[in-house]
Amino acid sequence: MLTSAPPAARWLITGAAASTALVIAAALLRDDASLDALEAATRAEHAAPADSAPRRPVEAPPRDAAPEGELATAKARGVIALEPLAARYPKDPAVFRALMERHALPPPYHAAALAAATRLLELDPGAAGDDDVQRVVSGAAAGPPEVASAALELMASGMGSRGPDLLYDLAVGSSALKERAARRLGEAAVLEKATPALRIAHELRVSPSCKARQALLQRAATEGDRRAIDVLSPLIVGKSKGCGFFGTSRCPAPCASIAGEIKQTIQAIEARAVSDPPAPGAAEAPPDR
């Protein structure tokens, strides 16, 4: 057919065939290259890096709380079992409460009991309101000097508003630490944590004169509690003797000039106290260490 066609026509037909062949070949080459690139990318995606180690299975996070059965068993066995349990569950307040209670049993191990109480308060600040915790910390203040210092520090900085209450009890008591407790209580940072009832009782107690106390009576009537009454009551009671010639005459009340105002303040505090809920009783300690 091509031989019978004119030369110009033969040239056009041959050129068109060649162009078609080039297009088909280019398409075939492009598809092969794309396929090779896709296969290479797939292999690279699924292949682990040469320098990577096999992945370890993800471990479950440790439990923060000891199982109830394990804690009960440790309580029954005493300190010898509770100490290792505390090391295994350092975030469980229940473990440190049990450890504190055991160490506080007679004869008390003040340092160990205070250490457990400190950790308990770090985990559960609300435990400062528990009678058992307060009893342990106050008891530690009667222990060796280094333990007593640690107990005062815990009262001052680690027990919220309950700490100043304990410091006040020491300051007004007969403890050998009364002066040190009074100094700690007088610190501004400690008084900031105190309740209004504690602050007014403290201010009444340290006021230098009856006139200075008179300025505090209105606050005492609305904020004070039994501690304020304990400060005010002696100010309106005279001694039966000790004054006058040879000390045989009756002594007037220290603040006789404002006795009427003090009596009204005491009555206001007592009237409010009638409606106050009773304080919760202390929990029983375990029977033995």
Image (spheres, rainbow, N blue to C red):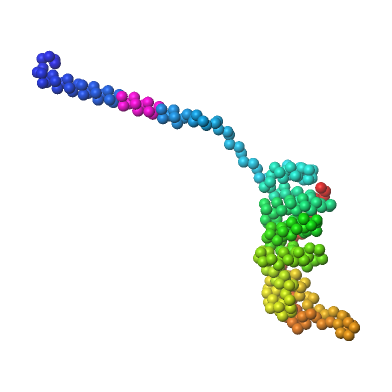
Q: Magenta part mainly helix, strand or loop?
A: helix
Number of disc labels: 0
Q: Nearest the camera: 106 or 222?
A: 106
Q: Quadrant of residue 78?
A: top right
Residue drawn at the location 27% of the way across and 25% of the way down: 26
Q: Nearest the camera: 245 or 28?
A: 245
- In this image, 235 relative to 219: left or right? right
Which segment did they paint magenta? 29-39
Q: Quadrant of residue 16?
A: top left
Q: Quadrant of residue 130?
A: bottom right
Q: Is residue 37 magenta?
A: yes
Please, is residue 159 above or below residue 95 in the view? below
Residue drawn at the location 78% of the way across and 68% of the way down: 172
Quadrant of the frame with the N terminus? top left
* Residue 278 seen by the camera: no
Please, is residue 35 above or below residue 117 in the view? above
Please, is residue 12 above or below residue 91 in the view? above
Q: Residue furthest left?
A: 6
Residue 225, how many percent across, how many down? 73, 70
Residue 200, how many percent across, how many down? 70, 71
